[in-house]
């Protein structure tokens, strides 16, 4: 292209571009929306990606009344259009937003507009020339005016139709591959898709937990801490299920982990699925009990708030203010999935395996043998589940009985030393039981974790032991509902205040006079 139809723009980034390298490690960075997105305005961006994927630099800019305005610069993921291009060159004719990409460190620091023009071109084509262009003859000037009018009318219509068709194809392809991006970008500008556009200034600080479907990070957004659960792409179904459960009408509750949003990060094989929730510094009930003992009042507060959250999850609420809230079975109740707020209020978390039950609709994947082996109910271990709503809710209640046992094992209310924290059945099967181990202990031997004799000497703990046994009953139909457990714990706390060892004998005589709420025959 001649000098009259080519423009060369150099960005305001620092000099020192290294061109001609296929291995791109860093690119010039600029973001015109830096104030709104709270990012850096300009600088150098290191490029990361899979070893077998190529990395590039890109630049986007606009022409506003003859003035070049840079929109974005930065790293770009594997794109065949950028291969073996040492220079960042836009070759499309008169785009709304100019875009180019290249390979080599800082190759986007200097970018060009050099359209592939026809042999004789209209001078208005090269709208970004620095100096005025010399007009060339218009090849259509001798044609009838009607032909010229039709030409200029049809070209934008055809172009618009092509854009609409391409957008529809992209939308269909995107929808079939993955669910939609759930936290929308706040940059509505016309710049091309980029790994930068969707990013908020959310800084990952440290890994707090690792689980079956990913890891949980403590993250910071401005002055607020959040939890970010990151799923690899192979676990997208769990991510999607958890997002759908959080999105159910009426899921906002004090004892359900507060959901903030979900989104996809990166592209192609680097794709990560993020689930963003409230962050609770005390962590899970498992972590807390490992490091702390609990008083009687603390036990009651944790147990009652956890039962309240589970009862709300299980409840079907047709007239909820946010719409019909269906009954939901958690299917992975354990102390690791009960989080504690600063005041020790419990909230239920991790809905990757949860099932919702809506009238006239399938509950989805109802594979029976899911969850954590240690907390599996006898009917789950046997593979003898009745695939009805109440059956799944009773499975949750068996596991909740084990969580209550964990709380009791670390309570200081009973006379005598407090045991070191142990997982349910850890004495019987160790820390890594197989399915066969759990079947032998729970199904064939019908064993349960030990309820200490000293617990029976405390009014409240004695009542709690009875409640625990009613939760983990071998017969699913005999188990308590979560609402009944919540009510019982409230009654325990009222009738068994903190007592000293000298009062224990007197209190024991009262145990038989306490009327507990009856079991509920139907959940």
Image (cartoon, helix red, strand yellow):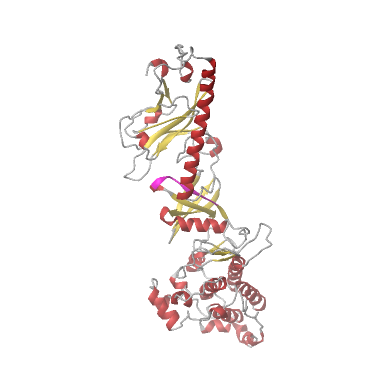
Disc count in the image? 0
Q: Is residue 123 above or below residue 204?
A: above
Could you say which is closer to the camera, residue 499 or residue 68?
A: 68
Q: Is residue 421 visible?
A: no
Q: Is residue 428 left or right of residue 329?
A: left
Q: Is residue 259 above or below residue 266?
A: below
Q: Is residue 161 visible?
A: yes
Q: Which residues are magenta?
A: 261-268
Left or right: residue 220 compared with residue 500: left
Q: Position of residue 507 (x, y in %)?
A: 63, 84
> x and y percent of residue 39 in the render?
50, 38
Q: Is residue 68 above or below residue 105?
A: above
Please tell me which residue is depicted at 42% across the width and 53% down the height of the picture.
233
Q: Position of residue 254 (x, y in %)?
A: 62, 61
Q: Does the magenta run of residues contain 264?
A: yes
The quadrant where residue 82 appears: top left
Q: Nearer the viewer, residue 138 or 206?
A: 138
Magenta stretch encompasses residue 406 = no
Question: Where does residue 435 sit, x and y in percent of width and height?
Answer: 39, 73
| Residue closer to the observer: 320 or 256 | 320
Most prominent secondary structure in the magenta stretch? strand
What is the quadrant of the N terminus in the image? Answer: top left
Picture quadrant of residue 324: bottom right
């Amino acid at each position: 292209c001649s000098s009259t139809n080519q423009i060369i723009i150099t960005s305001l980034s620092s000099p020192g571009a290294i061109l001609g390298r296929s291995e791109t490690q860093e690119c010039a960075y600029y973001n015109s929306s830096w104030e709104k997105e709270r990012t850096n305005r300009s600088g150098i961006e290191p490029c990361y990606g899979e070893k077998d994927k190529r990395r590039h630099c890109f630049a986007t800019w606009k022409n506003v009344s003859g003035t070049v305005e840079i929109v974005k610069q930065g790293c770009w993921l594997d794109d065949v259009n950028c291969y073996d291009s040492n220079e960042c060159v836009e070759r499309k004719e008169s785009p709304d937003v100019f875009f180019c990409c290249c390979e080599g460190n800082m190759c986007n620091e200097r970018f060009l507009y050099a359209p592939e023009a026809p042999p004789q071109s209209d001078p208005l084509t090269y709208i970004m020339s620095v100096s005025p262009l010399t007009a060339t003859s218009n090849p259509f000037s001798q044609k009838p005016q009607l032909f010229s009018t039709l030409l200029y009318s049809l070209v934008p219509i055809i172009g618009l139709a092509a854009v609409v068709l391409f957008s529809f194809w992209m939308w269909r392809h995107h929808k079939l591959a993955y669910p939609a991006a759930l936290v929308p970008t706040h940059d509505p500008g016309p710049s091309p898709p980029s790994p930068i556009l969707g990013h908020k200034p959310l800084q990952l600080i440290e890994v707090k937990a690792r689980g079956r479907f990913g890891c949980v990070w403590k993250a910071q957004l401005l002055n607020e801490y959040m939890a970010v659960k990151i799923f690899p792409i192979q676990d997208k179904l769990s991510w999607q299920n958890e997002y759908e459960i959080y999105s159910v009408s009426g899921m906002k509750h004090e004892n359900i982990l507060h959901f903030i949003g979900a989104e996809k990060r990166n592209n192609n094989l680097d794709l990560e699925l993020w689930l963003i929730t409230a962050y609770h510094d005390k962590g899970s009930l498992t972590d807390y009990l490992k490091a702390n003992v609990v008083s009687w009042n603390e036990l009651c507060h944790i147990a009652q708030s956890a039962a309240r959250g589970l009862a709300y999850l299980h409840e079907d609420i047709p007239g909820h203010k946010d719409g019909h809230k269906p009954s939901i079975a958690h299917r992975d109740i354990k102390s690791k999935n009960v989080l504690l707020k600063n005041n020790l209020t419990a909230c239920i978390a991790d809905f990757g395996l949860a099932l919702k039950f809506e009238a006239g609709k399938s509950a989805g994947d109802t594979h029976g043998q899911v969850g954590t082996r240690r907390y599996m109910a006898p009917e789950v271990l046997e593979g003898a589940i009745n695939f009805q709503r109440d059956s799944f809710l009773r499975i949750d209640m068996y596991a909740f009985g084990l969580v209550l046992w964990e709380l009791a094992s670390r309570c200081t209310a009973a006379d005598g030393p407090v045991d070191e924290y142990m997982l349910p059945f850890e004495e019987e099967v160790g820390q890594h039981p197989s399915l066969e181990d759990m079947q032998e202990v729970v199904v064939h031997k019908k064993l349960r974790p030990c309820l200490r004799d000293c617990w029976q000497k405390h009014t409240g703990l004695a009542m709690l032991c009875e409640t625990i046994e009613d939760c983990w009953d071998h017969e699913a139909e005999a188990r308590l509902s979560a609402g009944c457990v919540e009510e019982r714990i409230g009654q325990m706390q009222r009738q068994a205040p903190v007592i000293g060892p000298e009062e224990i004998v007197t209190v024991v005589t009262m145990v038989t006079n306490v009327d507990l709420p009856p079991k509920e025959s139907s959940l």
